[in-house]
Image (tube, grey):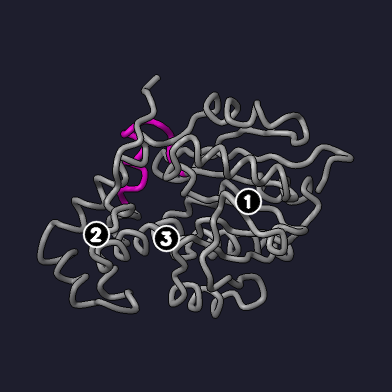
Amino acid sequence: MLPRLQLVEFNDLAATPAPLRDAIVESLSRSLRWGRMLRGLVDPFREFLAAAGTDEVLDLCAGAGGPASVLAGELAGHGAPPRFLLTDLFPRIESWEAVRAEHPETIDFIETPVDATAIPPALASGRARVVINAFHHFPPPLATAILADAVAGSRGIFISEALVRNPLSFLAFGPAGLAALLAEPLLARRDRVAKAFLVWATPIALAAGTWDGLVSTMRIYEESDLRAMVAPLGDAFRWTYGVYTYPFGGRGYYFHGVPRVGAAP
């Protein structure tokens, strides 16, 4: 078993130029759709919402809004999708407006920064929470704080990652991820010239995106890590862990908790 390493991703650095950061984040969102990487989450997520007893979802660490958009689209083929409310400590308003325009009935957002470790009661009330492909960014103390805050004031929390803790797992992203990155200068809403330079004229975007992907695999929390985090939080929530697959040999996990009967906030 490989040890978890809290290495640095370019996407996390304040010094990373905005066009490079956006190219990485936007390409990742696009690759989730093109590679059908979240389709395997549909049934587990529907089961989670049924157990949580809500169709209102607070999307924490929403990034460019791609995961929520993709999941909402996948869920639309299985009845009415839940309503997602996008939040992030660093809101991406322009990207979120575009996502909301695509899914006006199911996606909205909060314009102001929202700390995933301390959700205001007004946002928390009646909602479940989801963290898609972002939980690995948090070191253990902050990751535990996110789970603790969910136990203290939510209808449940659903975490998923499209990778496992093995650098080889990033290979499954290759086909869709490379296509999404190469298309980024054409499909981006801004900084197209800068992104064309980073993607087409130099290896900068490819190298940074590959590094971030490999580092992400080494940051992934495994089942034993997740259960160790929630163990001190008491037995108010019932926790479930599972794995799902996607094309090109991809494998990810989901981990969710819902209040036990009589313990809902």
Helix or strand or loop: what does disc 3 sit on?
A: helix
Find residue 29 and report its image quarter: bottom left
Q: Residue at x 67, y 76 (%)?
A: 105
Front: mark 1 or 2: 2
**Would residue 57 appear left or right of 70 to someone viewing this image?**
right
User: Mark 3 near mark 1, Cβ–Cβ under 8 Å?
Assistant: no
Q: Residue at x 65, y 70 (%)?
A: 106
Q: Residue at x 14, y 69 (%)?
A: 197
Residue topped by disc 2: 16
Q: Position of residue 166 (x, y in %)?
A: 36, 31
**Would residue 33 appear left or right of 181 to someone viewing this image?**
right
Q: Position of residue 183 (x, y in %)?
A: 28, 68
Image mark for residue 29: 3
Helix or strand or loop: what does disc 2 sit on?
A: loop
- Establish if 36 lies above or below 216: below
Magenta span includes 259: no
Residue topped by disc 1: 42
Count of all numbered marks drawn on residues in the image: 3
